[in-house]
Image (tube, grey):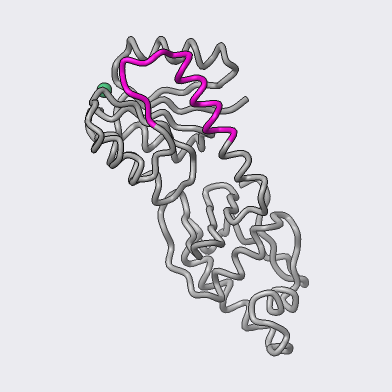
Amino acid sequence: MPKVLLIEDEMQIVRLVRAYLEQAGFQVSVARDGEEGLRRARQEQPDLVILDLMLPKMDGLDVCRTIRKSSNVPIIMLTARTEETDKLVGLELGADDYITKPFSPRELVARARAVLRRANAAGAEPTDLVRVGGLEIDAATHTATVDGVPVELTRTEFDLLLTLARHPGRVYTRAQLLEAVLGDAYEGYERTIDAHIKNLRRKIEPDPRQPRYIQTVYGVGYKLQEGV
Ligand code: CA
């Protein structure tokens, strides 16, 4: 069941849209202001965000811009304004579609399905985006985030993390990791992996001494924990 996050402060619209979406088979969660919307977008990892433009605390454009820094989730903007510029700004900030109030809920459901279909079609390609728990790694842009916060990684650290994250739970020996990230010219320098792992943990782990993501497998090597 696709999860939709609806960020909208007008209760009448919330009730109407929620009823139609639920009937269409979506699971709906609601945020009533921009800050709550951002929080829920991070925590709930929805499949689709429906975002009102005029919101308390943080407006829809800022919410959209912030979500886009760390996520490719499809976004449909709702706008009461009719000016073309607002729509364009929304699309430039990374919204996938927009719909102008007043709108028919049927129309919104149809747009939601269309946007999700497009997103799923794109997702069927070999994915550049790997997510494990709060960790998100984008191979296309060479960026990584932990709980939505970007972390600065060296190229080796990045390649190491991506290798581990592509197969959570799989155990890699130091030699395999070395080969994956540096090539076999470095054979025999397996302990250098330990130094990279140590740096990586310092950057991505909430508590590097008790790693949540990168686990040591004694006598063998390392793995990325499944289901964190
Ligand atoms: Ca509003």
Above or below, 62 relative to 52: below
Above or below, 187 relative to 215: below
Q: Is residue 12 magenta?
A: no
- Report whether 20 appears left or right of 127: left
- Choose between 221 and 132: the one closer to the eye: 132
Main SS of residues in magenta = helix
- Report whether 32 appears left or right of 20: left
Q: Is residue 111 magenta?
A: yes
- Choose between 1 and 20: the one closer to the eye: 20
Ligand 1 quarter of the rendering: top left
Residue drawn at 53 percent across, 53 percent down: 136
Q: Quadrant of residue 162?
A: bottom right
x and y percentages locating residue 71 in the rendered image: 46, 47
x and y percentages locating residue 6 in the rendered image: 41, 25
As drawn, the residue found furthest toward the front would be 84
Residue drawn at 50 percent across, 19 percent down: 109
Residue drawn at 59 percent across, 33 percent down: 117
Instruction: Give the magenta range.
Output: 98-117
Quarter that holds the N terminus: top right
- Report whether 95 appears left or right of 195: left
Q: How many marks?
A: 0
Residue drawn at 57 percent across, 59 percent down: 211
Q: Quadrant of residue 17?
A: top left
